[in-house]
Image (cartoon, rainbow, N blue to C red):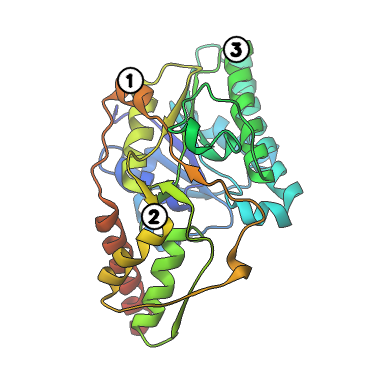
Amino acid sequence: MNEGAVVWITGAAGLVGSHLIEALHQHVPPHRLIGTWHRPTVDLDDILPLCTAEPLDVTDGEAVAASLNRHRPEVIYHLAAQSYPTVSWEQPVETMNVNINGTVHVFEAIRRIRQADRSYDPMVVVACSSAEYGASLTPEHVPVREDAPLLPLHPYGVSKVGQDLLAFQYWKNFGIRCVRVRIFNTTGPRKKNDVVSDFVQRAFAISRGEQEVFRVGNLSTRRAITDVRDLVAALISLAQKGEPGEVYNVSGDRVYLIADLIPLVERAAGVKLNVVEDPALRRPSDEPVIVGDSSKLKACTGWQQHFTLEQTIQDMFAYLQKKAAIHMLR
């Protein structure tokens, strides 16, 4: 990446945003790496020394326009979202507002700048989701390709379809360069509220004597799982090499039965887990299998996975241990 470029990130205090900042920090100085955030889901201390951090609510269109106009970034990573399917059932209006209106505000801010400065031509990387495929994710139709029907099964998935198609519309009608990245199951250090992080957190508590029972929901679903650091590598490569207007899947190649995660978690925690199924942990709807075809991404960028799920889980435990040790010292 050009070290003189300004990079602007929404959702910088989320899982993907925080790891993206860590990766870009190696090439982009903090005064050119703008991390915006609202309602952080990670420890802000992990990112504040590495970037110019700004509070920003993407549902505030004027604030988005002011920040973009002030920084005029060459590369924009739009990651801000209400990203939890379970929460989207409880807060569908907020989910639509953040994910759809937030995307409109980013693209409209770019349009406003271009009206005054026609030379302004940033690349926008839009974080979309495998949840857009929904009912298309059936055993006979996976790994799913980018041309599969978009049939989401929850409000979050619907909001991501809207975000995805809005990005395409702004490219098609206004020539705003963007790539849409349909992200499949991703986890890693700092992750919360997915099956891997839930398993790791519960096993960590059991290893510390804080819990006894390891409660689980549906263990029969199957998921391809990508380490967040591999995802970040894909996002950076697509910002540089992606074809404007195109959409790319980012999915792990190996599919795991959720039940098969338990031995990996046990090895990392060094404990034998007392597994108990809890109906309260089941979702209203759950895709039986989620795995995507990433061949288009690989052909465009040469992307490869480097982290095994076993390594990812070990690193997630190490992160929890590090944070627990810091908390003890305070």
Say what secondary structure mark 1 lies in: helix
- Residue 300's disc number: 1
From the viewer's perspective, is 19 left or right of 164? Answer: left
For the point 76% across and 47% down, the residue is 93
Q: In this view, does 165 lie above or below 78?
A: above
Q: Do the residues labelled 1 and 3 touch (CB within 8 Å)?
A: no
Q: Nearer the viewer, residue 77 or 53?
A: 77
Q: Residues within 10 Å of mark 1 (few under 14, many from 20)?
A: some
Residue type at mark 2? Ile
Farthest residue toward the bottom?
Answer: 209
Name the residue tied to disc 2: 47
Q: Where is the N terminus found, in terms of image quarters?
A: top left
Q: Earlier in the sequence, mark 1 or mark 3?
A: 3
Q: Distance between the residues labelled 3 and 2?
A: 35 Å
Residue type at mark 1? Cys
Q: Which of marks 2 and 1 is nearer the N terminus?
A: 2
The mark lying in front, picked from 1 and 3, is 1
